[in-house]
């Protein structure tokens, strides 16, 4: 495959179109360092793309970060409202750790807030001179030093307090809003009482609930949903993409907490996951591949060659698979036991039209779903394999390649970047199949354009994957430094950059609902190949080598199958066509 062996000419902007249209780069020169820089910044909007790509609208939080933020918020409320830290923490938990909400409510009506939260200014009951007090739970008398109470003053012994708090902590995070054991009292029980009366095990549990509440009760923070991950994410809501990449390497959607799924929206992902796990496809399979017993109506799959079917006990009804009639009625007058012609007669009379139509619809629906699901699952498998290859590359192969090619590991980052891009592109490509499944059937122009863009993405990703996997292996197997390793570096870095730009623009196009294709099926003039990562036809950096590519013969745009690519929408038209079938532009 020549496009794999020859290097793309970085100064010929048409070469980027060639990359995704399957054409080979003829008479390409070796790429020097300046050429690589040019490829990496190929698009006119490269600065915007770069800033968009690395703009992070979230912060990953460790457990230490969470504790520090929690302590800072408690300190802020305690200082501003002049209340103890325990009371400040109770207030913050009640208002979901929103400092501004606490301030607003407190200064609007302090008495109302105190009553709602359970922060009493003075005890409800007092025993100033009593030496012994009666526990309100076990009704035993105890010396005053063995009695404890919340801010309300209701007396309870240490044993009853320990049992009360232990039961509440065992029941779960609800212990954070614990109130006085007296049924008529609403005084809050803070962490100071827990630390004083609970066992060490219960204290640890309470502390974990207290820490987790800062994330789980706060609308701006969430835990990473990856199994075993203890990182949390602080997200700036309304700041663009919902995609989040945790330090554990798991990427997920902030909005629905499913794995990252751009360009598909959360609603489509929910429908797709439900469809993959629901019984709907089982019913479709049953409808498409079985028939009901005429007597007991249980579905039966035909697993042998003859048409004589016997239902399973206790029914045991014998019938003909073709016409569903009783087997006892079959003989020479119906065409023979194994050649029933009554079915064809009944079909011609329309007896089976509705049932057959329903069965055909189920079969077509099942085949269509299977088509998209298999490709969705295959790209998921490829992504998992790429993740394993990436880990192998980072832990073993980079060091090995560094020794063999006499290159410092810092100069081999382009390989890791290529594998990271492959992993990301596999994820995007996987979800384009869910996108395609729910794309309306009647929107033929959009479907045709989508399938073309998806095919180009597949092709470009395969080029990058093959270069990073197979071509790299030759340098890993080499006995010593290779003269053309720098050429390989430039090629792989260039493919990574071009593939990244194409997929980013593809994601934007799909998220915009392929708005370049209007309701009449025509593609907007703005949907040029440049907008999907095809590059610009302008000469760059003062070099004019690429300026003549557009003025060459029209056969320049023909690919190996004889199709020509439209310069406006990149659609591959048949050789005989003079007008693009999508955007109606002349050749």
Image: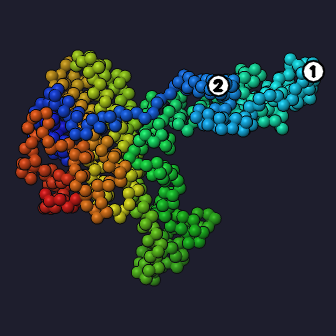
Residue found 75% across the figure and 20% down from its top: 196
> Which quadrant is the N terminus positioned in?
top left
Left or right, residue 227 beside residue 406: right
Residue found 73% across the figure and 36% down from its top: 111
Foreground: disc 2 or disc 1: 2
Label 2, secondary structure: give it. helix
- Identify the residue position indicated by label 2 in the image: 78
Which colour scheme appears in the figure?
A: rainbow
Q: From the viewer's perspective, is residue 234 above or below residue 294?
A: above
- Do the numbered discs 2 and 1 sit on residues whose CB atoms are within 8 Å? no
Q: Is residue 320 visible?
A: yes
Residue 38 versus residue 70: which sits nearer the camera? 70
Q: From the viewer's perspective, is residue 213 above or below residue 159?
A: below
> In the rendering, which numbered label is found on residue 130?
1
Q: Is residue 15 visible?
A: no
Q: Locate residue 155, reporting x and y percent.
A: 86, 27
Judge the density around disc 2: few (<14), some (14-19), many (≥20) Cα neighbours within 10 Å.
some
Left or right, residue 266 beside residue 208: left
User: Going from the N terminus, do you reach mark 2 or mark 1 first?
Assistant: 2
Residue 97 versus residue 128: which sits nearer the camera? 128
CA gap, disc 2 and disc 1: 33 Å
Judge the density around disc 1: few (<14), some (14-19), many (≥20) Cα neighbours within 10 Å.
few
Left or right, residue 495 beside residue 425: left
Residue 70 versus residue 468: which sits nearer the camera? 70
Q: Locate residue 230, reporting x and y percent.
A: 53, 28
Residue found 31% across the figure and 19% down from its top: 399
């Amino acid at each position: 495959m020549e496009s794999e062996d020859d290097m793309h000419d970085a100064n010929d902007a048409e070469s980027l179109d060639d990359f995704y249209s399957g054409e080979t780069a003829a008479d390409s020169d070796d790429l020097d360092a300046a050429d690589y820089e040019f490829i990496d910044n190929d698009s006119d909007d490269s600065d915007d793309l770069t800033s968009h790509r690395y703009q992070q609208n979230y912060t990953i939080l460790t457990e230490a970060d969470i504790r520090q933020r929690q302590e800072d918020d408690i300190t802020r409320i305690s200082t501003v409202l002049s209340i103890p830290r325990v009371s400040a923490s109770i207030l913050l938990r009640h208002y979901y750790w929103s400092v501004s909400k606490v301030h607003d409510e407190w200064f609007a009506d302090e008495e109302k807030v105190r009553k709602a939260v359970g922060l009493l200014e003075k005890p409800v009951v007092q025993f100033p001179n009593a030496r012994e007090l009666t526990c309100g739970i076990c009704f035993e008398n105890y010396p005053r030093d063995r009695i404890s109470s919340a801010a309300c003053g209701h007396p309870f012994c240490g044993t009853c307090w320990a049992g009360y708090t232990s039961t509440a902590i065992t029941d779960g995070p609800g212990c954070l809003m614990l109130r006085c054991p007296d049924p008529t009292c609403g005084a809050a029980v803070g962490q100071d009482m827990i630390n004083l009366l609970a066992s060490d095990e219960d204290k640890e549990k309470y502390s974990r609930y207290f820490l987790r509440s800062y994330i789980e009760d706060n609308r701006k923070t969430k835990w990473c949903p990856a199994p075993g991950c203890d990182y949390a994410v602080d997200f700036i809501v309304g700041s663009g993409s919902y995609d989040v990449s945790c330090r554990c390497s798991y990427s997920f959607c902030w909005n629905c907490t499913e794995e990252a799924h751009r360009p598909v929206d959360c609603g489509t992902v929910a429908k797709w996951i439900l469809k993959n796990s629901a019984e709907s496809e089982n019913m479709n399979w049953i409808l498409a591949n079985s028939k009901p017993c005429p007597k007991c109506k249980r579905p039966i799959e035909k697993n042998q060659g003859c048409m004589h079917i016997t239902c399973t006990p206790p029914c045991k009804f014998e019938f003909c698979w073709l016409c569903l009639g009783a087997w006892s009625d079959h003989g020479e007058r119906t065409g023979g036991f194994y050649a029933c012609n009554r079915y064809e007669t009944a079909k011609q009379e329309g007896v089976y039209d509705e049932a057959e139509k329903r069965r055909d619809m189920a079969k077509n629906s099942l085949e269509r779903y299977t088509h998209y699901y298999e490709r969705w699952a295959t790209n998921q498998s490829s992504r998992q394999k790429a993740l394993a290859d990436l880990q192998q590359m980072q832990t073993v192969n980079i060091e090995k390649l560094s020794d063999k090619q006499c290159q410092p590991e810092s100069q081999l980052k382009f390989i890791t970047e290529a594998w990271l891009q492959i992993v990301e592109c596999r994820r995007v490509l996987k979800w384009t199949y869910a996108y395609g499944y729910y794309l309306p059937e009647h929107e033929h122009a959009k479907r045709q354009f989508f399938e073309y863009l998806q095919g180009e993405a597949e092709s470009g990703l395969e080029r990058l994957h093959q270069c990073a996997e197979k071509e790299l292996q030759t340098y890993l197997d080499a006995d010593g430094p290779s003269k053309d390793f720098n050429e390989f570096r430039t090629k792989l870095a260039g493919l990574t950059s071009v593939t990244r730009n194409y997929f980013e623009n593809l994601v934007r196009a799909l998220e915009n609902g392929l708005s370049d294709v209007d309701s009449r099926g025509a593609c907007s003039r703005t949907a040029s190949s440049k907008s999907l990562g095809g590059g610009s036809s302008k000469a760059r950096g003062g070099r004019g080598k690429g300026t003549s590519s557009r003025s060459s013969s029209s056969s320049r745009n023909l690919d190996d199958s004889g199709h020509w690519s439209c310069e406006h929408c990149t659609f591959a038209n048949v050789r005989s066509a003079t007008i693009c079938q999508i955007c109606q532009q002349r050749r």
